[in-house]
Each structure stands twice: as C-alpha cells, then as structure tokens.
Amino acid sequence: MKIESKLAQIGNRQDPGTGAVSAPIYHSTTYAHPALGQSTGFDYTRTLNPTRKILEDAIADLEGGVRGFAFSSGMAAVHAVFSLFSPGDHVIVSSDLYGGTYRVLEHIFRPLGIEATYVHTGHLEEVEAAARDTTRALFIETPTNPTMQITDIAAASLFARRRGWLTIVDNTFMTPYFQRPIELGADIVVHSATKFLGGHNDVLAGLVVAKSDEIAERLYFVQNSIGAVLGPQDAWLLMRGMKTLAIRMERCAMNASAIAAWLDARDDIVKVYYPGLDTHPGKSICSKQASGFGGMVSFEVLDARMVPFILEHLKLVTFAESLGGVETLITYPSRQTHADIPEEIREKVGVTDRLLRLSVGIEHIGDLIDDLSQALDHAAEQVLSRRR
Ligand SMILES: *Cc1c(COP(=O)(O)O)cnc(C)c1O
C-alpha cells in the first residue's frame, strides 16, 4: 500500500468489536487479568496502552521498522535513544543540531560519562577524524536545523555499520512521507512528532522506530523503565494529525520552494538555506534520498538590525518557536531554539544573529509572499534607508 493510503487509514479497523473508524481512546490505566497467569496483552498503561499501540504500530509501518515507541515529547524520545548507551561510550553527532538535543547531550549525558563530538556528518572525513575506540553511534539530522546541511544517509549508515556503530536519524523535518532512513540503512529513527507529524501546533509528542528486534527490545526496556510515555488522548490527537500528513507535506514543500526562490531574488537577503534551491550544496543528495525538500526555509538578512522590524511587522506569519504546523511560523534561532548552543559553535555552522527560520504552512502562497514582502520592505526602509 502507498504511504498516502497508510496515513489516511491510521486507526481504522483497529476495534473489530465496534467497527470504530477513528481509533478508540483507552484511558484505563490497568487491565483485568482473565485468570492467574493470563493477560489480554494489556496489563498496565505505561507498559502498553491500546491507543498508544495503534500509533506505535502505525509509525513503525510508515518508517519501515519492526516496532515503534511513543513518548511524551521529542526530547523524551531523544533521551530514550541515548539511554541505550553506557558510561564510557562516545557518539558522533551532526554539529548543526536541534538545541535541545545538544543540551541533553552536554548537560545530562556528558556528566553521566557519555560523550558527544559534533561534526558535519555529511563529511565522512570529519566523522572518521572524530572516531574513537569507544564510539558507538552516529546521530544525524538531515536536513539540519536550521541551516539545512544534508548528510547522505545511505553512505553514513554504511560507514557506521562497518565500524559496528548504530546510525540514528532525527527525521523530524522530512517525516516518513518524504524520507525513510531505515530503508536507507539507519538503525533507529527519532521524531519530534510535535512538528510535521502532528501538524497543528496542538500536541507535544515524540516517536522512535527500531529497525531490528534486538534494538526494539532494548528501547522497549528503556521506555517502560523510564516511563516518559505518550498519554492516550495525545496519541489519538497525533494520529488525527498524521492522517493528513501527505497533503500537508506536499503543500508546505510547494509553498516553501516558492518562498525560497522569492527570497533568493531579493538584494536585502544575503543567503537562503533550502535544499531544493539549485545553489544548495546538498540538493542532489537530498533529491536522491528524499521525495521532497520539506517545508523549512532559513534565510540571512543583510543587517541584524532588520530582524526586530521584520518580526514586529509580520501580520500573517507568526513569530513563535516550533515548526511543522499548518500555520506559517518564523523563528529567530540564535535567540530561541539555539540559545543554549555556545556562540562560537553557532557562528561556525551559520546560526548568526542575521538568520531567521521559516516553518512554511499551508496558507495561500500569495498571502504569505505579500506578508513577507511588506515586513521585509519595512525593515529595509528603516535600517537600510531604502525606499521601494
Ligand atoms: C522540536 C525538535 C526536537 C524536540 O522535540 P520536542 O517535541 O519539542 O520535545 C528534536 N529534534 C528536532 C529536529 C526538533 O525540531
């Protein structure tokens, strides 16, 4: 079955007793045992919940893995994945990284003896140089957040497998609709489902998918032991959002591509980061491993003083953290999502105080461009004393 059909059908035919088309929400925290030593398969909700299981089965199927796990947030999912490692272990991680992942690695895992080195994971010579005897995994974001660096997932996974490392991909930006890392060789996929999967800025959730039974067993142990599971109401809300993922991703990518080209043509924009632009160094690899370029566009304005004028003047586009919803949002990464990353690391990957990031929604493209146009014109006029 094609992915559009799988998505639309999430939750259907899961409750034969009633024929419910929308997955039922099981709030019960405990489940009666038919007799001593017997179980319906459900005992206690942290261990397994019927609503959460429908979601977990769905994401495993969508990503092409053996088992899925739903967590209370993307960070809980990332935390669960790094909990697979032990003191003394080392991981190599994409340097242009979601700020929260950097924070959990540096401030939770490093003090516990699990160290990370940050490199451009698309440059395998950098990965090679960072390798240690204790290296256990390669953790990749592609495209990265916010400068859209691309890593060849198949090449990186092969490189890691030959050394006995796990390959973990944060697939939040692309979703399984555009990119399926397990099919390309990755061992684990992690998501902030708060973003494109949920798609409506109304549910916080994280998902993990394992490629093999062995990894799935270990992840299940971590999930049940730590207990940061997704509640049944949120699991249902996430599935409701995921049903329309295909049409949302198509529209977000179409709008993002038009906005990237439009921004690229302006002389008050120094640089546009979008993997679908011909000038993007990762375009050919991204086209090879993904069926779309996604809905995220970052851009650098000529002068940092333009930023407050742009943010205050937008009327349709909302100045807010987060991404992946139907509503277009604009973020100022150096002050918001990436504020926890030291300035020298930020500047090196391009997260300067001139960089803004758009999460492009599904509004009419004409309205989005009109809004961006009036805000940028206003900022240019105020700061660069330009009249248009
Ligand atoms: C948001 C995000 C996370 C963290 O997810 P939460 O749901 O906010 O906890 C992790 N990785 C990426 C790429 C993200 O965008």
Image (cartoon, helix red, strand yellow):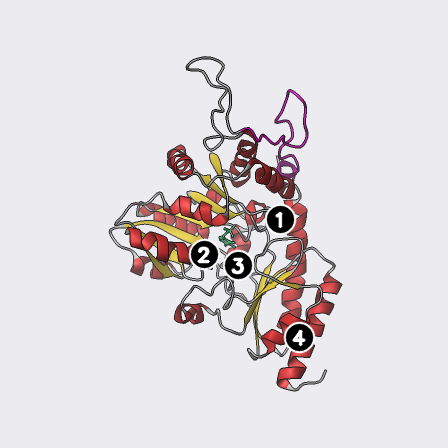
- Viewer-proximal residue, 58 or 336? 336
Residue with the mark numbered 2: 100
- Viewer-proximal residue, 4 or 323? 323
Amino acid at circle 2: Gly
Q: Earlier in the sequence, mark 1 or mark 2?
A: 2
Report how far apart the C-alphas of labels 2 and 3 lie in the structure: 29 Å
- Viewer-proximal residue, 377 or 213? 377
- Range of magenta residues: 3-28
Residue under the point 60% across and 61% down: 320
Residue with the mark numbered 3: 284
Quadrant assignment for the C terminus: bottom right
Please tell me whether residue 74 is drawn above or below residue 122 in the rendered image.
above
Where on the picture, by quarter, is residue 80? top left
Any mark on residue 376, and which? 4
Residue with the mark numbered 1: 202
**Residue 156 drawn at (x, y percent):** 40, 52
**Residue 129 drawn at (x, y percent):** 30, 60
Report how far apart the C-alphas of labels 4 and 3 lie in the structure: 30 Å
Q: Earlier in the sequence, mark 3 or mark 1?
A: 1
Q: Nearer the viewer, mark 2 or mark 3?
A: 2
Q: Nearer the viewer, mark 4 or mark 3?
A: 4
- Viewer-proximal residue, 122 or 327? 327
Mark 3 secondary-structure assignment: helix
Q: Nearer the viewer, mark 3 or mark 1?
A: 1
Report how far apart the C-alphas of labels 1 and 2 lie in the structure: 19 Å
